[in-house]
Image (cartoon, grey):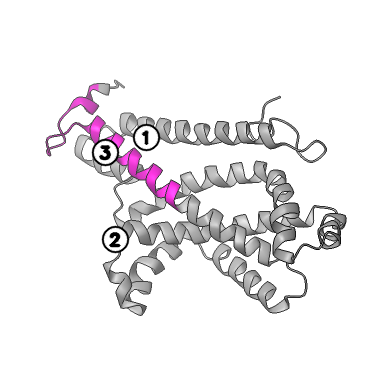
Amino acid sequence: MTWDWKVFLNDDGSGRTYLQWMFDAWGWTLAVAGASWVVAMGVGLLVGVVRTLPNSPWLVRLSNAWVELFRNIPLLVQIFIWYFVVPKMFPPLKELPSFILVVFALGFFTSARIAEQVRAGVQALPRGQRYAGMAMGFTTAQTYRYVILPMALRIIVPPLTSESMNLLKNSSVAFAVSIAELTMFAMQAQEETSRGIEIYLAVTALYAVSAFAINRVFAFIEKRVQIPGYIVAGTAGGGH
């Protein structure tokens, strides 16, 4: 078996090399993952907080329903629903590019998992934290903003690390609706060049580099915001 890495320098028929095509696809992968992460964090934080609200049973039930709905339906099915079903139910959404629809699907899917982590982080805090905020005259919103969330978000940095890495890897399903990300590049380039080993090894390396970069960023954040007794330094990166 011989490996020919020069395949990446060949023209793909559109005036660019396969190497340029691969890095363009990498950019799309990072764009999908990054935009979806923003949606997932925003919605997940909101839903997770609502699930812990005292004296709001209906809001809690609605947020619980959100989590159960989005985490119990396979991601690929959700991608297809957003791409084929939702635009037919809401015609104005037909004008949205497939990139946006995929971001919503992946973001909402991940938001359910992040919401569960936020809930766990809030409930891991001693009840005295909430009572201290109430004793100072804070409203519920102020108690969460100034007392509970700053502590809870620090506690859940390690699971957020794993979830962010999973989101990057889950972005590969975007190929199913013709987003030109790394997985689609690998499939098409392999068909055109018949050099599957080189193509898939290179794509694997880019996924690994991307995931490792996310791991290191969160490890740095964890180290800076760790709370003694709640987080052990280096758990996000698996180091010491």
Quarter of the rendering containing residue 89: bottom left
Q: Nearer the viewer, mark 2 or mark 3?
A: 2
Q: CA distance from mark 1 to mark 3?
A: 11 Å
Secondary structure state at the residue bearing disc 2: loop
Which residue appears at 27% of the width and 68% of the height?
Answer: 95
Q: Give the x, y percent position of residue 16.
A: 16, 34
**What range of the chain is rendered magenta?**
6-35
Task: Give the number of marks.
Answer: 3
Q: Amino acid at mark 1?
A: Val
Nearer to us in this view, 135 or 148: 135
Q: Give the x, y percent position of residue 135.
A: 86, 61
Which residue appears at 32% of the width and 71% of the height?
Answer: 93
Nearer to us in this view, 195 or 103: 103
Secondary structure state at the residue bearing disc 1: helix
Q: Amino acid at mark 2?
A: Pro
Residue 190 marker: 3
Which residue appears at 29% of the width and 54% of the height?
Answer: 178
Q: Nearer the viewer, mark 1 or mark 3?
A: 1
Residue linked to disc 1: 203
Whether tag 1 and tag 3 are in contact, CB under 8 A, the answer is no
Query: Is residue 30 one of those drawn in magenta?
Result: yes
Nearer to us in this view, 45 or 20: 45
Secondary structure, magenta segment, majority class: helix
Q: Give the x, y percent position of residue 96.
A: 30, 64
Q: Is residue 215 above or below residue 84?
A: above
Q: CA distance from mark 1 to mark 2?
A: 25 Å
Residue linked to disc 2: 97
Q: How packed is label 2: few (under 14 Cα within 10 Å), some, or many (20 or more)?
A: few
Q: Quadrant of the C terminus?
A: top right
Which residue appears at 37% of the width and 53% of the height?
Answer: 174
